[in-house]
Image (cartoon, rainbow, N blue to C red):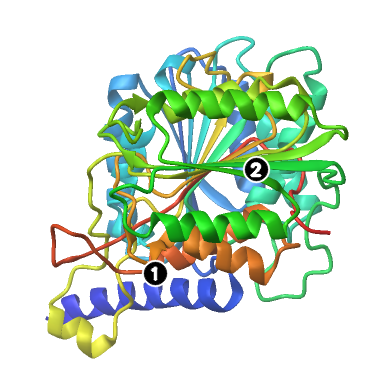
Amino acid sequence: MAFLVAGTLRVAAQLADARDSLRRKGKYGTQGSRVALTLSSPGVSAATVAALDRVFQTLGFENQKSEVLVQGILKELVRFWEQLDAQRGPVSCALVALVAPGKQLRQPLPLVQDLSRCEALQGRPKVFLLLSSDPGAGPEPGAFLAGLGELCSRSPHWSLLQLLTELFCRVTEESAGDTYCPVFQSSLRGALCLGAVEPWRPEPDPGPSVQYDLSGARAALILAVVQDRPGAQNDVEALGDLCQALGFQTTVRTDPTAQAFWEALAQFQKRLDTYKHPVSCALVALMAHGGPQGQLLGVDGKEVQPEALLWELSHCPVLQGHPKIFLHQACRGGNRDAGVGPPALPWYWRWLRAPPATPSQADVLQIHAYTQGSSSRGPTSGNADVADVLTVYAATEGCVAYRDEKGSDFVQMLVEVVRANPGGDLLELLTEVNRRVCELDVLGPDSQAPRKACLEIRSSLRHRLCLQA
């Protein structure tokens, strides 16, 4: 019994500390150790592994290294998180670096789901760094990490997302003439600072000073199926009003068929070409029912691939070098996330006033620092066309996106947060939106048990993006 009480109190204190830090400071706490796992496939040079190890040590991570075949990656990851649970000490952050041929890096979701089972990392950030060992597939792995380490040392107050944005800018400048741009995918609920500065200290240097120039024209396109989607009209009106308040020339089309999605996007692109002034930013919002594989369903019930729509707009010549924002309010599968929380008896948690469950795919950052190659389904890292793209999904891959008569949690929370601070860094604002969405308990139409939702933010932005000066 004493063992149960001690373990439960430890987890309770860990979750309470994480929740308190996120709510009051908007940042992850730093209490506990930092742990890293480097998994490299046979053939990766010892110099690359040593370079990774040096950077991790500089950032304060205790790094474990293992050479492993692709079939053994999950086994090594399970051993890693079982070891963390067994040591019973607080962990503030975990970083998993995978250096392997590019084809072995394209399905990281099973790794993310597996590490999320680690009790020691509940409520804590989990970072996956995916580096290709293929020649010409991106920056040399050690060089990429060295650049990140140098930025962390120089600007310890910056969040990791800010550092990655600056690093992406450097990488694309250094690879002029090539077709390379990294991408990160985030479900973080707060700022993650890896520098040697505690989150509650003063911040004289808030972040990168270079911003996108949004002095030109701004254009927005909202495509929404409102038929048989209660609350969708409220989302359309709220988002449309926000776009207009931020200076976007906004076009709204409701109840498009699958074909009409394409037609509206083509008309939008043609209209951009006719603007008298340069277009400095474009925003496209897609709202509809979603299919089991993340497809959008037009009002006619036919499917359209949302990534293909995004890919099409990324080729628009007038938008090259300018930020392109995509908002996706639709289901991406049928999974209803019950969330994760510390195992204990219900009466025990009532006595401890335990924090609510956290979405199972929250607190994850994936860094795709390699070339995936082109795809007909949508933008992928490794192509110049995907630079300067910010995509926000209302649900993580495979999960349901929730909405009621008042509208969707994602859109309504987005409008609320941006209106409160329209001049803020958009990545930081979206992280705050995700924190608030993750705290909600949602009752789905087919279950009386509470469910959780979590955003997915993908970015290849190379500068800060602030929608109002």
The three-letter amino acid code for the residue at tag 2 is: Ala
Neighbours of disc 2 within 10 Å: few (<14), some (14-19), many (20+): many
Q: Quadrant of the N terminus?
A: bottom left
- On residue 439, the disc is 1
Confirm or deny contact between disc 1 and disc 2 (CB under 8 A). no
The three-letter amino acid code for the residue at tag 1 is: Glu
Q: Is residue 114 left or right of residue 219?
A: left
Q: Quadrant of residue 439?
A: bottom left
Residue drawn at the location 70% of the way across and 50% of the way down: 162
Q: Is residue 76 visible?
A: yes
- Mark 1 and mark 2 lie on one chain; the one further toward the N terminus is 2
Residue at image mark 2: 220
Residue 446: image x %, image y %? 13, 57
Q: Quadrant of residue 274?
A: top right
Callout 2 secondary element: strand
Callout 1 secondary element: helix
